[in-house]
């Protein structure tokens, strides 16, 4: 992120030059790219979004409700329940809410129990221009938006612009309908319909933008035109904000694309200089955060500060207009508290349960760009009795599937519950973090320079023109002392801990800063020096050595090879997307070694080495081997993916070694010289 401001300026300058130089002649005239709205982009950095799963949130009107749904909640949430919770949300320091879809999802005659559950989610609507009566009325939706705006809270709807309920979809006010199948619909034929949806609710209710469900279903060219509709509607709509000012709706759009950075760019952000969407959820970094302070949904964890820093560095893969949005949880993943229990790390009665929550939330608070908090994460919520993965064939009937479990009833202090001392302590900590973001623009929009990143610690320097912060977080359970050189962190005076007011002065140019297990500090630099911080130089190994690093080993007959079935390099590569492709089939090279050479694009990848029927799967021991180094090869399985970062484009050799008896032995990834 360090060069993001400069990259944006350069990109805009280039676009301006190209536009100015375009000829009026038919042979040279070009259409200028439709850039992201600068005012929206600036304000979006400061978004602190509170996500609400409507049907599982708060039951504010007992006369309505779905009464069924996925997950363990009461399934009777409604718009009144959100209105009743706005004071609580405001008290946290949040300035936006995102609600899951509230459009009509009418039942079709004879539909089954599972369709009723799906209707409650809102993600397969029948009428995109009507509020579902089981959530409330149009008047109640207007009241919700107005009450939110009175409190300085933006309102984001959930835009499902790639699919709808099969068998029943109602036309728009102008008579349009989506085209083709129901999931996904056809584009560009459906573009006008969804553009009308996007603009309608901004004009009708004065909402401030959209969260975009499964954004990869919509081509980037169509996203540009839908974004134009959102911008136009926002420009032509005004409301009175909490300061008594007449303002336009924000027009923020954020994409949901569960994949790596390259795929998010390809299907969401679009090309450098020609933006499709301007913001997307930072799923890749979310998983790194859980893998550092807890475990991920597949029980992979025990990472450190270097893992977080590598994830932050991956932002360089995005185009300059990209504004990633970091969340810790959402309605489709397991709550952080349940992940701590799944990893056998900590229970709610353990102090580390709460310390690890604070560490993860502090990392989110120090993030440049918009952030999203899923309801309940601010109090360390979890579901009693849930930790292990449930049988996927029966978990839905029990409300215990991984992608449903976070849809638990909301615990809103003073409204639906009284918080325990531990929950209240975490809530108050989150409020302090949000206030730090409000008061220190270096956190939400600052240029990041990493100072230290290792197994035990993560330290960043964050800076805007008049604000410089050192953020640090421990990634281990034991206490430690950091010795920071004043010159390295760009400081020539005191450091002030913004959470404790403790001051640290340099002694012979060195700051001694104690840090307990999973503790975070936000240290304000009182006197920044003119030179600024010095980034830690890091050497990246590209090449291995020996037989397994050679890219030109001849293929030999596999008569005496230890593995009889063909193995494939299967992962989230752009040319295969977890499919078994011929160009990624392993060949036997002798010495019990199999290799495949593939041309790769720079970026992070996850993969396993598997037969076509997945009967045999292998992965790297520890799951994150270093490039150019030999690593143990072990049996793999679902969720046990090898993850590696390839820092340059080019050919790479992927090598697997087995024992003569066919047991996994070692693996290596090396760039071809």
Image (cartoon, grey):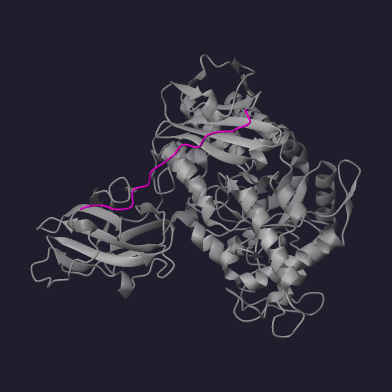
| Percent position of residue 403, x then y | 51, 54
Q: Does 329 sit left or right of 47 as displayed? A: left
The residue located at (54%, 24%) in the rendering is: 486
| Percent position of residue 263, x then y | 51, 63
Chain part drawn in magenta: 529-545
Snapshot quadrant of residue 481: top left
Snapshot quadrant of residue 343: top left
Q: Is residue 241 at least partly visible in the picture?
A: yes
Instruction: Work out whether residue 147 or residue 646 is closer to the camera in this orientation and state it.
Output: 646
The residue located at (8%, 67%) in the rendering is: 560
Q: Is residue 329 magenta?
A: no
| Percent position of residue 386, x then y | 46, 42
Instruction: Work out whether residue 403 or residue 500 is closer to the camera in this orientation and state it.
Output: 500
23 relative to 85, above or below: below
162 relative to 504, above or below: below
Image quarter (top left, top right, bottom left or bottom right) of the C terminus: bottom left
- Which secondary structure dominates the residues rendered in magenta? loop
435 relative to 289, above or below: above
Q: Does 589 sit left or right of 511 as displayed? A: left
């Amino acid at each position: 992120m360090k060069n993001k401001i400069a990259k944006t300026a350069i990109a805009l300058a280039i676009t301006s030059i190209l536009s100015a130089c375009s000829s009026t002649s038919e042979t040279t005239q070009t259409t200028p790219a439709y850039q992201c709205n600068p005012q929206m982009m600036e304000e979006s950095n400061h978004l602190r979004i509170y996500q609400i799963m409507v049907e599982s949130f708060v039951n504010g009107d007992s006369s309505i409700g779905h009464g069924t749904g996925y997950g363990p909640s009461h399934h009777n949430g409604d718009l009144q329940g959100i209105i009743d919770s706005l004071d609580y949300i405001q008290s946290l320091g949040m300035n936006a809410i995102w609600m899951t879809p509230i459009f009509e999802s009418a039942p079709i005659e004879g539909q089954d129990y599972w369709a009723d559950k799906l209707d409650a989610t809102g993600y397969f609507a029948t009428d995109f221009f009507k509020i579902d009566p089981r959530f409330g009325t149009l008047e109640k939706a207007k009241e919700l938006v107005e009450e939110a705006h009175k409190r300085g809270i933006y309102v984001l709807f959930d835009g499902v612009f790639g699919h709808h309920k099969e068998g029943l979809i109602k036309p728009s006010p102008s008579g349009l309908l989506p085209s083709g199948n129901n999931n996904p619909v056809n584009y560009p034929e459906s573009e006008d319909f969804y553009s009308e949806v996007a603009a309608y609710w901004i004009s009708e209710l004065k909402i401030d933008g959209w969260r975009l469900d499964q954004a990869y279903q919509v081509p980037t060219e169509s996203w540009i035109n839908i974004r134009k509709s959102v911008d136009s509607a926002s420009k032509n709509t005004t409301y009175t904000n909490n300061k008594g000012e007449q303002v336009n709706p924000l027009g923020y759009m954020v994409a949901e694309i569960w994949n790596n950075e390259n795929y998010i760019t390809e299907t969401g952000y679009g090309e450098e200089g020609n933006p499709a969407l301007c913001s997307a959820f930072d799923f890749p970094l979310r998983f790194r955060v859980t893998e550092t302070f807890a475990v991920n949904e597949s029980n992979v964890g025990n990472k450190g500060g270097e893992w977080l820093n590598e994830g932050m560095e991956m932002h360089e893969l995005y185009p300059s207009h990209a504004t990633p949005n970091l969340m810790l949880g959402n309605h489709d993943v397991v709550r952080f508290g349940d992940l701590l229990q799944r990893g056998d790390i900590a229970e709610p009665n353990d102090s580390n349960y709460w310390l690890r929550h604070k560490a993860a939330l502090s990392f989110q608070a120090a993030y440049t760009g918009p952030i999203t908090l899923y309801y309940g994460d601010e109090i360390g919520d979890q579901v009693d009795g849930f930790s292990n993965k449930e049988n996927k064939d029966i978990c839905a009937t029990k409300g215990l599937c991984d992608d449903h479990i976070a849809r638990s009833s909301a615990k809103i202090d003073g409204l639906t519950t009284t918080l325990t001392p531990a929950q209240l302590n975490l809530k108050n900590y989150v409020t302090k973090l949000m206030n730090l973001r409000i008061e220190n623009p270096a956190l939400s929009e600052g240029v990041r320079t990493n100072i230290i990143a290792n197994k035990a610690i993560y330290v960043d320097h964050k800076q805007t023109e008049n604000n410089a912060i050192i953020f640090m977080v421990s990634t281990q359970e034991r206490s430690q002392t950091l010795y920071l050189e004043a010159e390295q962190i760009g400081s020539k005076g005191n450091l002030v801990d913004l959470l404790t007011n403790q001051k640290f002065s340099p002694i012979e140019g060195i700051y001694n800063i104690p840090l307990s297990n999973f503790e975070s500090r936000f240290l304000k630099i009182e006197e920044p020096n003119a030179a600024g911080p010095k980034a830690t130089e890091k050497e990246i190994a590209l090449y291995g050595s020996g037989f397994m690093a050679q890219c030109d080993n001849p293929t030999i007959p596999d008569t005496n090879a230890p593995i009889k079935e063909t193995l494939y390099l299967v992962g989230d590569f752009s040319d295969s997307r977890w499919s078994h492709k011929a160009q990624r089939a392993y060949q036997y090279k002798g010495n019990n070694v199999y290799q495949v050479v593939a041309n790769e694009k720079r970026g992070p990848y996850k993969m396993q080495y598997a037969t076509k029927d997945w009967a045999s799967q292998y992965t790297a021991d520890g799951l994150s081997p270093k490039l150019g180094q030999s690593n143990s090869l072990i049996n793999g399985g679902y969720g046990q993916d090898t993850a590696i970062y390839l820092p340059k484009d080019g050919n790479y050799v992927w090598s697997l070694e087995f024992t003569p008896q066919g047991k996994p032995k070692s693996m290596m990834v090396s760039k071809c010289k």
